[in-house]
Image: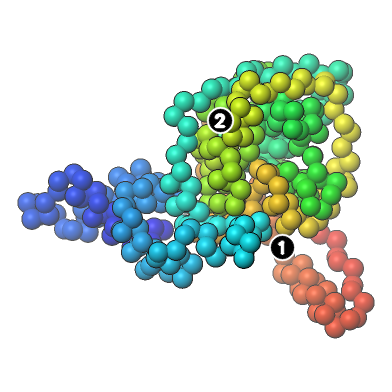
Amino acid sequence: MLPVAFAAGAALVTALAAGVNARSSPRLDMDRTAEAVAEAAGGRYDLMGLAGVMSRLDGAQLALALRHDPAMGASSLPGLTPGWGNLRLGGRPDPFAVATGLEALRLNAAEAGESVVAAAPPFRFQPAGADDRRRALRCLTQAVYYEAALEPDDGQLAVAQVVLNRVRDPNYPNSICGVVYQGAERNTGCQFTFTCDGALARSPTTWGWSRAQKVAERALAGEVAKPVGSATHYHADYVRPWWAPSLTKVSQVGAHIFYRWKGAAGTVAALTHSYSGREPVIDEALFARPRDVVTAALGYEPMLDKSAELVRDLLGTGNRTVEFEGTTKIVGAPSLGGRRQPTAKEISDINERLKAFEEGRPVPSPAPTPED
C-alpha cells in the first residue's frame, strides 16, 4: 500500500503536469487522486510502482512526504547528506550498514544507468567432460534459483549473465562453480549468500528449479542478457549497499540493479579470461550449514541483505505471481529459494536454547526439522 503522503504528492504533481483544473469537472477529487497515483505507479502497487510515484516528486515534495511517512520515522532528516547515519569519524561509511526500504528506493532511483550498454559476447561453454557439464549447469541453476526465483525470465537471465561475466573477468575464478561458491569456505567472504546462509539445506520447489534450469541452459547455450552488458555485480532495488557509488550503474532488470567496474576494467573488452572447462567438486552438505555472513558486506558482492527481505515483506509486496510454461503461480518469497517459516515448536526450541546459553547451562541440541 502506498503511503498517504506519497499518494497526495503524486496526485498534485501529475495534476499540475497535465494541466488539470479540478473545477472544470464534476468528478470528485479522490477520483482524480486515484487516477493520478495509478498513472504514476504504472498500474503497479509494489515497490516498482512506488518508485514511479516517487519519481514524480520534486525535492521539496519528497522531503515533505518522507517527513510524514510513518515507515521512515526519523531516519531521513532534512538538510543532511544521505547516509549520514552510517558515517564513522574516519569518514568511511559503515560497511555493515545498508540503506533499506523507501530510502534505498529513493537513492537508487536518483542514480541514472548507462544510456548505451554494450552487450557481452555469448559465453563459449566447452566443458572438459560430462561431469563438468553437469556441475556447471547445477551451479548456475542454483545461482539463478536462490538469487532470482521470483524474477521474470529476463531477470533470471540477467543473474546468469553476471555469473558468466565473472568467469571471464580476470578478478574471479575461471569456472562457473568457482565463481558461484567463491569465498563460501570462509565465514567472511561468500559472494552469493545462499552458499553460506543455510539456504541449500532446504529442497527447492520442483517447478521453480525447472524454470531456473531452463534459463541456465539458455545462458550456457550462448543467449545473452543484453541490458546488463558487462556487469559483474548487482543488488536488490530495495537495498542500497555502501559500495554502490564506487561502481558504474548499468541498468535495472526486474528487482535487481546491475553494476560494472568503473573505467576500462568494466568494459566488455576486459572480459578476457578463458573458461577453464573444468568444474570443482562442491561439497553441498558443508555449504548447507548456516554461517555468519554479516562481514561479507566488506567486499563487492551481489548479495541480498536478509534484513532487506523482511523490509520488502513489511512494505506490502506479499505474494507475487510467476509465469512458468503458460501457468501463473502465486507464491510468497519464503516459499522459494529453499526458505520456509519456522514452526511454533522450532521457535520454542530456539528460545529455550538462547535462554540456556544466557544462563550458562548446557545448550540442548536442536530437534530435527521436518521435511517440506
- Secondary structure at badge 2 equals helix
Percent across and percent down for residue 298 are 71, 51
* Residue located farthest toward the front when viewing the structure as drawn: 90
Q: Using the image as rendered, state which of residue 165 and residue 29 is in the foreground.
A: 165
Name the kind of residue labelled 1 in the image: Pro
Percent across and percent down for residue 23 are 8, 55
173 lies above or below 90? above
Which residue bears the numbered disc 2? 228
Q: Using the image as rendered, state which of residue 126 and residue 74 is in the foreground.
A: 74
Percent across and percent down for residue 189 are 78, 48
Mark 1 Cα shell of 10 Å, populated few (<14), some (14-19), many (≥20): few
Of mark 2 and mark 1, the one earlier in the sequence is 2
Q: Is residue 4 left or right of residue 199?
A: left
Name the kind of residue labelled 2 in the image: Val
Q: Using the image as rendered, state which of residue 185 and residue 319 is in the foreground.
A: 185
Which residue bears the numbered disc 1? 342
Q: Kindly indicate the quadrant of the structure image that contains residue 93.
A: bottom right
Count every numbered label the image shows and give the total.
2
Mark 2 Cα shell of 10 Å, populated few (<14), some (14-19), many (≥20): many
Q: Is residue 152 in view?
A: no
Q: Is residue 275 left or right of residue 249?
A: right
Q: Is residue 226 in view?
A: yes
Looking at the image, do the residues carrying marks 2 and 1 touch, with CB atoms under 8 Å apart? no
Q: Residue at x 83, y 74 (%)?
A: 353
Which quadrant of the rendered structure holds the N terminus? bottom left
Q: Residue at x 14, y 48 (%)?
A: 20
Q: Residue at x 73, y 43 (%)?
A: 191
User: Label 2 to label 1, Cα distance in Å?
Assistant: 36 Å
Tag of residue 241: none
* Residue located farthest toward the bottom when viewing the structure as drawn: 359
- Secondary structure at badge 1 equals loop
Percent across and percent down for residue 18 are 18, 44
